[in-house]
Amino acid sequence: MKAFRQVAVLAAAAVIALACGGSGGGTSGGGSSSSCSKTYKVGLVTDVGKLSDKSFNYDSWQGVLNAQKDSSLCVQARAIESSTQEDYPKNIAQFVDQKYDMVVTVGFKLGDATIAAAKANPTVKFAMVDYADFTDKPPPTNLVGLVFQEDQPGFLAGALAGLQTKSNTIAYVAGLESVPAVVKYVKGYTNGAKMTNPNVKVLGIYQPESGPKDFNDPDWGLQQANTFFGQGADIIFGVGGNTGNGALLAAKQKSKTCIGVDVDQFVSYPDVASCLMTSAEKHLDIAVKQSITNMVKKSWQSGTLTFDAKNNGVGIAPYHDYDSKVSTDVKAKVSDIATKLKEGSLATGVSTP
Amino acid sequence: MAELLQRIDLVGLLAATLVTATPLTLAALGGMMCERSGVVNIALEGIMLTGAFVGYAVAFTTHNLWLGVLAAMIAGTGIAAIHAVLSISLLVDQIVSGTVMNILAVGITGVFYRNFIEQATVAGPGTLPHWNVPLLSQIPVIGPIFFQNQFVTYAMLVLIVVVHFVLFRTRWGLRTRACGEHPRAAETAGINVYFVRYVNVIASGALGGLGGAYFSLQQIGNFLPNVTGGRGFIALAAMIVGKWTPLGAFLASLLFAGSDAVGSRLQIYGVHLPIQFLGMLPYVVTIVVVAGALGRAVAPAAVGRPYRKS
């Protein structure tokens, strides 16, 4: 009797867990305009998370939607949200099976699945957002990796921080050092600060690898930020998903200044709006739309497409609520640096692979 | 020298240790109430996770962090109550029941999070305010460590004393320990073993739920899937290392939390070890300590055994 009860309890739990775990599913985009001789079907596969994540998935999807709105491109778009990492190949295959012309995958975690799918389906075009690691695997001609020069927005954020710091000490709390984008942001930030303020001290830390907590440990990020505040820092740059967000939250609690990353975090993380000076951004929407345009206009480029200050692929977000706390003099200096990065007359000093 | 002291920031390190030890200690206190009465509670991880989620959901909806804290504790008691029914009345193996609660908590919080919270575009409820205790917070060293904290950490400090008093200085504590050591003898002496066990298991749910509030309402002002990240299990280790006493569990929690804080600070101090090794430090310390560096720990004699009324 007792054994039966235990089995029954376990079975009940398993049923509930299964019923709960199997979420996910599709989200559809709109239609296409009628004046097209051929409509191009573009599918987007998200990283784990929703299209509404106000971050990578959302911005990439905006790029697809912008392409769909552009009547000269004749694009019809759909997206699938991945609920676990095991979904990546399956979700990519769904679009391939339905004869889509192009598949966009979001985030470096989908890199391997995308490369495998591209090799298996040479007639379908593939674009990977934020990934182009082809060092030991020559890219198929139907595959493009969209990468960003993160050192440039990092440099701008650092330049601003160097001008704004009152304690001559600034800091960063970063995600994994094994992710090149993170390192580029950090190095750019450090160099930018040292350019505008040669006396500045830059403190910082990378998160140790910890499996599910990678880029996802705000409590850890918060405590590191508090350490840096204890060491005199007054501005903190959070570069690492939720881990970095923890650092931003610490700045808000301790009335310090924070700088966001990747997207305009004034929008994506409104909790910290009051301490947010700016965000070092990469414009995923512009990059994604560009790759779709290349496919439609028959100007497809395989390999790596780099987005930088020149093609407006990166930049820093508006000051928002911080606008009044940044002097016009500082604003002018920062926008001057932005212009020089754009023209190419100024380098960040960060070597990009 | 002053430069070096500022770099090491020992006060900051100790303050961080106390904060990090908060959920470990609370869950360990809960586990202790439970085990002292004879019920193993490995559901603490799930209890904390549920507390973290429900607390956040309520704070998010009502814009009241204190209602959130209350809700976290109530949610914890809810999960604990299910565990109590299964393991006390239905005589289900306590480990099985606890595991079921943990699985259930991960699934349910994950689903509700994905469907209701992840998509929210408005600002969250924020975090519990820092309270500086008047005068005491101005004492050098002691002040910044103990008296400039947030609610859950203060509550933890008070509860260590309360649980110690209840377990070792009250009639209820004596009965609890009797049920954990020899339930048959306790019943012969006129103690209602089921009642004592029920109350203790449910109390452990409230403590665990408060520990959950630490994550979502005190530290990060948000909920993330599996935000507790195994802290409930480390708390059980702390309870064992602390030999089922509140002060012992607190010290063990400080040890685990301290190795965590030191591990990440070594990188900040510029010690050139691969950061993967530094990240391993808390786990290595846990293994070494639990493996018996501090001597044998003896559990309550009747813990883990369902009690059938005669």
Image (cartoon, coloured by chain):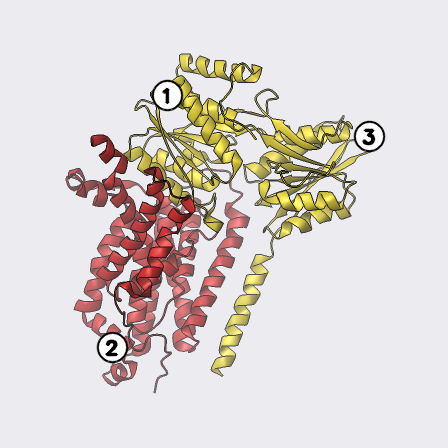
Chain colours: A yellow, B red
Q: In the picture shown, does residue B189 fall above or below B143?
A: below
Query: A43 and A149: which one is in front?
Result: A149
Would residue A203 be seen by someone viewing this image from the given angle? yes
Q: Chain under label 3? A: A
Q: Are marks 2 and 3 on the same chain?
A: no
Query: A114 and A58: which one is in front?
Result: A114
CB of mark 3 within 8 Å of CB of mark 1?
Answer: no
Tell me the quadrant of the picture where the C terminus of chain B can be found.
bottom left
Q: How far apart, in angstroms, are the residues tagged by discs 1 and 2?
A: 64 Å
Query: A21 and A34: which one is in front?
Result: A21
Q: Which mark is residue A164?
A: 1
Label 3: which residue? A36
Q: Left or right: A292 with respect to B216? A: right
Which percent across, then down, holds residue B259? 31, 50
Q: Which mark is residue B73?
A: none
Name which residue type carries label 3. Answer: Cys
CB of mark 1 within 8 Å of CB of mark 2?
Answer: no
Mark 1: secondary structure: helix
Q: Give the mark nearest the N terminus, 3 or 1.
A: 3
CB of mark 2 within 8 Å of CB of mark 3?
Answer: no
Q: Residue at x 61, y 48 (%)?
A: A82
Tell me the quadrant of the picture where the N terminus of chain B can be found.
top left
Name which residue type carries label 2. Answer: Ala
Name of the residue lying farthest toward the right: A37
Q: Residue at x 59, y 19 (%)?
A: A310
